[in-house]
Image: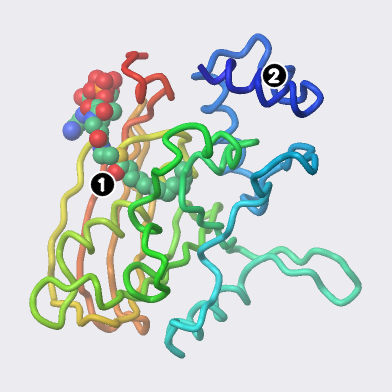
Amino acid sequence: MLRHIARRLGSLHGQQIFNGLKGISPDQLLSKEIHRHLQSSLETISPISTTSLWPFSSQPRDFSQPNSSWSPEMRKVYDDYIGLCDTDSENGEKQKGPWRKLPSYNRSIKYATAGIHLSKLIQAKARLFTRNVKDQGATFEYVVFVNKEEKRCVCVFQAGHLLEGAPGHVHGGAIATIIDTVTGTLAGFLSGPIMTANLNIDYRSPMPLGSVVLIHSALDRIERKKTYITCKVTSTDESKLYTEATALFVSIGVGHLFGSRN
Ligand SMILES: CCCCCCCCCCCC(=O)SCCNC(=O)CCNC(=O)[C@H](O)C(C)(C)COP(=O)(O)OP(=O)(O)OC[C@H]1O[C@@H](n2cnc3c(N)ncnc32)[C@H](O)[C@@H]1OP(=O)(O)O
């Protein structure tokens, strides 16, 4: 199917996409591309050439950029981590930092080369659960920073008013969602395409709506197809523990999503 779609796109775009897929199975295609993009800078998608006839934008929107709904606390933690990321110095040289901010799109497929175009063709109405509400600040505001060397990440998360569970506090399912997302992002970054097999959560303290918290995730171990991640959710000064979790992700070929076992 992907080759068929690429053939149609390729006819619009100088055969670029289809030629790139020759000899590669759909499984290999997305596995390779998604993994390569996650492992590399994750900064931009390689855009395919566009013509004025092409109705779609070629750059996906990064949802993990500051916006007016962010509290000063959210912005301060974000700025602190940005200060630890790769930067361009005044003389134009790259300065290495231990952290990297990951972009966040409203569909995972957008991480793949030409994924923004494929996303218009495959289940076009689908949206990532955590990025499906347009009202900024209403649900999940979050940014993930990853430290590749230490195989861990930190997510700055501001919980919006539509995430209520117990009165005035964040729903346990919403907390599970953001934990699944952050631990899954780290597992995907380290191991390529994965799915959640197991998620264990201990809720230690209620999290007030509007809270800004840190979600610390780290690799525990990798055994064959299994990637084990540990997770702690704390206040931004790390004095308060809200939640602890462990997660198991199993590596998949993309064919797994279409019913084939490999
Ligand atoms: C893109 C970036 C940004 C994107 C940012 C977004 C990130 C979002 C991340 C969210 C991800 C999700 O929510 S995913 C949605 C929720 N998850 C699902 O729907 C998954 C449904 N389950 C499945 O499809 C399957 O059961 C799998 C893939 C989990 C496992 O497939 P399988 O076919 O059973 O795997 P199999 O090869 O037999 O097993 C491999 C090894 O894992 C072990 N194993 C398998 N399942 C389990 C289990 N539940 N608990 C313990 N161990 C297990 C086996 O014993 C074996 O161990 P050994 O013999 O090697 O010792």
Residue extending furthest right? 91
Do labels 1 and 2 touch, CB within 8 Å? no
Between 54 and 251, which is closer to the camera in this rendering?
Answer: 54
- The amino acid type of the residue labelled 2 equals Phe
Mark 2 packing: few (<14 Cα in 10 Å), some, or many (20+)? some
Query: For disc 2, does the CB lie below 8 Å from ligand 1?
Result: no
Quadrant location, ligand no. 1: top left
Q: State the residue at coordinates (49%, 44%).
A: 189
Q: Is residue 42 left or right of residue 243?
A: right
Badge 1 marks a residue whose secondary structure is strand
Q: Residues within 10 Å of mark 1 (few under 14, many from 20)?
A: many
Q: Is residue 109 left or right of residue 59?
A: left
Quarter assignment of residue 135: bottom left
Q: Is residue 37 left or right of residue 199?
A: right
Circle number at residue 18: 2
Instruction: Find disc 1 in the rendering and name its residue.
Output: 247
Quarter placement of the C terminus: top left
Mark nearer the N terminus (1 vs 2) = 2
Could you tell whether 259 is left or right of 56 in the image?
A: left
